[in-house]
Amino acid sequence: MTEQEIQDQLKTVIEPYVQNQEAFENLTKETQLMEDLEVNSAHLVDIILDLEEAFDVEIDDEAAEKMLTVGAALNIVQELLNAKD
Amino acid sequence: MMASKNHRVVITGLGICAPNGVGMTNFEEALRAGRSGIQHIKELEELNFRCQVGGIPPLNSEILEQNFSPLELKRLSAKGVMYGILAALEAWQDSGLPLPNPDDEPRWQWGTVFGTGMSGVQTLREAIYKTDEGKVKRLGGSVVEQTMPSGISAFLSGKLGLGNWVTSNSSACSTGTESIIMAADHIRQGRAEIMLAGGCDADGPYVWGGFDAMRVLSKNFNEAPTKASRPMAADASGFVPGSGGGALVLESLASAEKRGATIYGEVAGGYVNSGGQRGNGSMTAPNNLGTQKCISGAMAQAQVKPQEIDLICGHLTSTMGDVLEIQNWSTALGLKGKDFPKINALKSLTGHCLSAAGAIESVAAILQLKQNWAHPSLNCQNLHPDILAQIDANCVVRETEVFPMQVVAKSSFGFGDVNSCVIYKSWKL
């Protein structure tokens, strides 16, 4: 998967949980999931499950806790995908 | 002595999600036409249930998309909770109350008592399978809120910004009626202005299996589902399981008048008790004395005389309990033969909606009271002889009847020998 493909799929996964649409439209790697996109903390758990399913990877707790920004999520998914290859 | 306007409780909104009608328009149509919502359930047949019929509200994607966001639908699988929310949102909108913005301050004078039985059992089943497979991590973030008994009231408080009492009661098949009495009492005590009351329950093999095993469900009409629920009939031999949600917006008279709300009627009085599983009472059967005291207690609070009751919307499940129920009403009211009030059984059209029953049946009762007609009880052309020994056959409403109504009584009885009875009065300026 190219970086762009990963980024697009990540956006698709996150979209239903976003409560601040404006922040979502102006998404950057620095965008914070909870502060900027106003994702509910209980929903973060579900985002991680959805990412695991979408990319067929397993995200451990340590990685999940680091997943605070869009960029961090991208990096984590990228690393897991690289490890698979 | 007339209670003050802050201590009189009126009904200003109704909402319904019933097997024979989702939404008040469909429900009213079904009641007036005597249309049953009971159908053959293939899954029950495949799972070797004795009873293979049931009442399930007909939901479609249009109704769901109107009432839930895509994210809510993605995270919500508990059917009972869904039915409760649909009924509650309709009642809320019917009452003319606003849907608050996310940034609004909680409404400290608005609350809910919304009861349930096994609303989230299907969700719990899936969670149990994952847990047993060692995949607890895969449960996701929405299992707790869907399977905790107070899930329905928690959802409603979030949707409506309720800042007063938010709770769920649970008293088996008495739950729905009990919630109305609890909510009305709370307003009468001056602790809230508006309370959303109601009940909801789920359907399917995991809710209904225990009843099937006890042999208390209907099993002789699997090929003729709409004939299966036969309250008061000579050959009534078991109830038809149902599901759904019913909701009422209750309000102090002062609050309703202040905002110019449409008033359906008044919750004039109510009573909740138990027969203590003594005398002829048990886990599954009501103690006659307890039932009679419950009816008398509700009438005393409502200051209503037996002769003033125009219609009884009974509990009447289509079991042998129907005979005892009529006997208890007759004894409690001191009325028999032709003097007994009119009586009908909504369960003949919906099946027994368990924890939702009292709320669904109260919505029906108030609709009939407001509009002065009574829906037919199906499948009781041949009334039980022990019922005919107590009351005149014409007391049982078997065709839709139109007559003026001032007072309607609604009772519910549940496993554990628990009783509730509420008296609704018409509202006239």
Image (spheres, coloured by chain):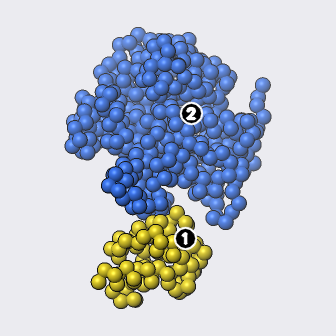
Chain colours: A yellow, B blue
Residue B214, position in %: x, y? 32, 28
Which chain letter goes with mark 1?
Answer: A
For mark 2, does the 10 Å Cα neighbourhood hold few (<14), some (14 to 19), or many (20 or more) residues? many
Q: Quadrant of the N terminus of chain B?
A: top right
Q: Is residue B93 left or right of residue B148?
A: right
Q: What kind of residue is marked 2?
A: Glu
B74 vs B302, nearest the viewer = B74
Q: Hey, what amino acid is under mark 1? A: Val
Disc 2 is attached to a residue of which chain? B
Point out which mark residue A39 bears: 1
SS class, disc 1: loop
- Vertical order, B243 against B238 (above or below): below
Closer-to-camera residue (A52/B268): A52
At a point 44% along the width and 57% down the height, the residue shown is: B76
Q: Is residue B23 left or right of residue B178?
A: left
Q: Which mark is residue B320?
A: none
Please tell me whether mark 2 or mark 1 is closer to you in this view: 1
